[in-house]
Image: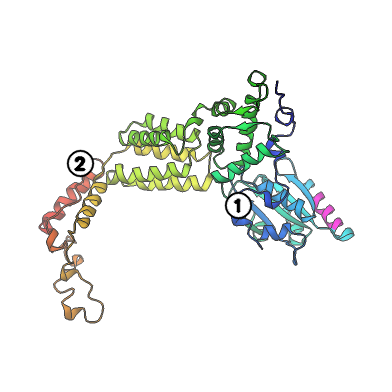
Amino acid sequence: MVTSPAPLLSAQTPLAVRMRPTSLAEVAGQQHLLRPGSPIVTLADPAAAAPGTVSMILWGPPGTGKTTLAQAIARSSGRRFVELSAITAGVKDVREVMQQALNQRDLYGQSTILFLDEIHRFTKAQQDALLPGVENGWVILIAATTENPSFSVISPLLSRSLLLTLQPLTDDDIGVLIDRAVADARGLNDQIEVDDSARAALIRLASGDGRRALTGLEAAASVAASPERLVDGEKPRITDDDVAQAVDRALLRYDRQGDEHYDVVSAFIKSIRGSDVDAALHYLARMIEAGEDPRFIARRLVISAAEDVGLADPQALGIAVAAADAVAFIGMPEGRIPLAEATIYLATTAKSNAAYVGIDAAIADIRAGGFGRVPVHLRDAHYPGAKRLGHGKGYRYPHDADAGIVAQQYLPDELRGRTYYAPKQLGAERDVHARLERIRRILGS
């Protein structure tokens, strides 16, 4: 019988920790920060002509490599490395590190890198304690945060540090991490196989978070390597069912590139259009739990606000755009809340597709060759020689009229009398409908 791989089940150190890169060359993703000559690369290179000494704040979502980068810098640079967590460290701990760093510099000429995780959890007084060491070069600070430093880090510390923004890992980056963990001696040591469908499920589960991907892989490997599953002469094999069982999420079968993706998104939009708020929230939850990109969901809400709500509720588009901005600003999981608010608003408000129908009808005319020449009195009369051509002659300035509207032709001759926009008697468009009737009577349409 095949024995269970030791690193798989008995290692006390989590797989995500065991697989931390030992150098910047092993880091997956964040290539925009790792170009030759960049501050991180310079800081990590002990042979650099001018070794980096600048402090930096790493800002990005969980699992994107903030701690990984700091530790890779420490291993590569040869500098003394001290790690503190803002969750457990206090002002006393910071001052002790600063004093030790000063002693190391003065006695041995050795510089110290201080990695401070979760710096946004430090109070102003605690952050103030960092300033002397950073300003005088006793330490090179590498601080990590998942919160916007503009709001969570004091200005003097921000001005003395480089702010580097980390991006969520791409699916390709996550795939590299999974494949490496399966094959590497620090990881599963090539003692287990992963189905393509299981690999895809782990990537979807990760949603840009490398730590989450490796945690899911480790849990799924434990399921696949359980004694009742082992077969003589065969490696344990992780399936997508193992992944779903390990993380207790059956919805991982949702495929962002497959039919389920399009079916769920279609049902989401049609539920909003049909004003069924409960169904819309159900499909929103399915997408969130399956690891759908929240930016994709936000884009669909913006489209729905313009296409299905339109001017029946002019606020709808602004609310959808605000939700998209909020998701980009705060990330997930908190981003689910503005997504839900926008979904509820769009599902419960008045609907009109008149703007959508109107622009498509106008485009159809253009594509059919129905555009004609701009009427002479509407043409630009500002450039030299325009008036000699009659441009602008006969144009009536609407602001000179009491109603702010004057009867004159705006459409080309070929399309005179054509109407594209037909507002509905719903929501705010009811008022637009009445106003537009008056306008068209004045224009003589």
Is 163 included in the stretch rendered in magenta? Answer: no
Q: Callout 1: helix, strand or loop? A: loop
Q: Using the rendered image of the protein, determine whether residue 436 is visible from the camera's viewpoint.
A: yes
Q: Nearer the viewer, residue 13 or 394?
A: 13
Q: Quadrant of residue 310?
A: top left
Is 97 included in the stretch rendered in magenta? Answer: yes
Q: Nearer the viewer, residue 64 or 217?
A: 217
Mark whose residue sits in front, 2 or 1: 1
Q: Estimate the spatial distance between the alpha carbons at disc 2 and disc 1, rounded to whole Å.
A: 52 Å
Q: Residue at x 25, y 81 (%)?
A: 384
Q: Which residues are magenta?
A: 96-104
The residue beneath circle 2 is 425
Q: Residue at x 89, y 59 (%)?
A: 107
Which residue is at the far front?
A: 233
Mark 2 residue type:
Gln
Q: Nearer the viewer, residue 72 or 187?
A: 187
| Left or right: where 39 falls relative to 348 | right
Mark 1 residue type:
Gln
Query: x, y (%) of residue 199?
Result: 56, 35
Q: Residue at x 74, y 57 (%)?
A: 140
The residue beneath circle 1 is 30
